[in-house]
Amino acid sequence: MGTVDFGAMKMKLMGSITAISAIALLRIFMKLEEGAPMNRYTLIWMTIIHGTLMLSALVLAISDRISPRTPSAPAAPPPTGR
C-alpha cells in the first residue's frame, strides 16, 4: 500500500465533498423536472455552496501545484560500529 501525502489527501477530501454536493444539487434539479415545488432560495443557496466548494478545491489545487516541493529527508548513515 502506497503512502499518500497531505496535499493528495486534501484534494481527495475536497473532491469527495464536492461530489456529494453535486449529487445533492442534482437531486434538487431532478425534483424540479418532475414538477415538484421547490423553494427558490434553497436552490440558490445550494448552487452558491456548490460553487464555493468547487472554487475552494480549485484554489487548493493551484496552491498545491505552485508550492515548493520539499524532498524527503535523506536516510541516516549506517552506524560505524566503533
Image: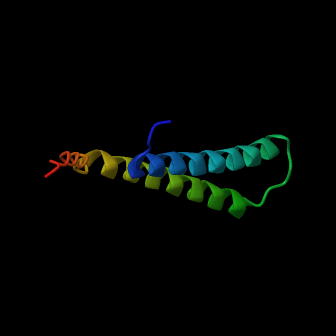
- How are the colours assigned in the image? rainbow
The residue that appears at 33% across and 49% down in the rendered structure is: 64
Q: Is residue 70 left or right of residue 15?
A: left
* Towards the viewer: 39 or 14: 14
Residue 62 image point, x, y percent: 33, 48
Along the viewing direction, whichever of 12 and 71 lies nearer the viewer: 71
Q: Position of residue 50 (x, y in %)?
A: 58, 53
Q: Residue at x 71, y 49 (%)?
A: 24
Name, please, the residue furthest toward the top: 1
Specify whether 63 is left or right of 22.
left
Q: Position of residue 6 (x, y in %)?
A: 41, 52
The residue shown at (76%, 45%) is 27
Depth order, front residue of 39/49: 49
Question: Is 41 located above or below residue 68 in the figure?
Answer: below
Residue closest to the eye, 67 or 62:
67
**Measured from the top left, where is residue 7 in percent x and y?**
39, 50
- Count of all numbered marks drawn on residues in the image: 0
Residue at point 77%, 61% (across, down): 39
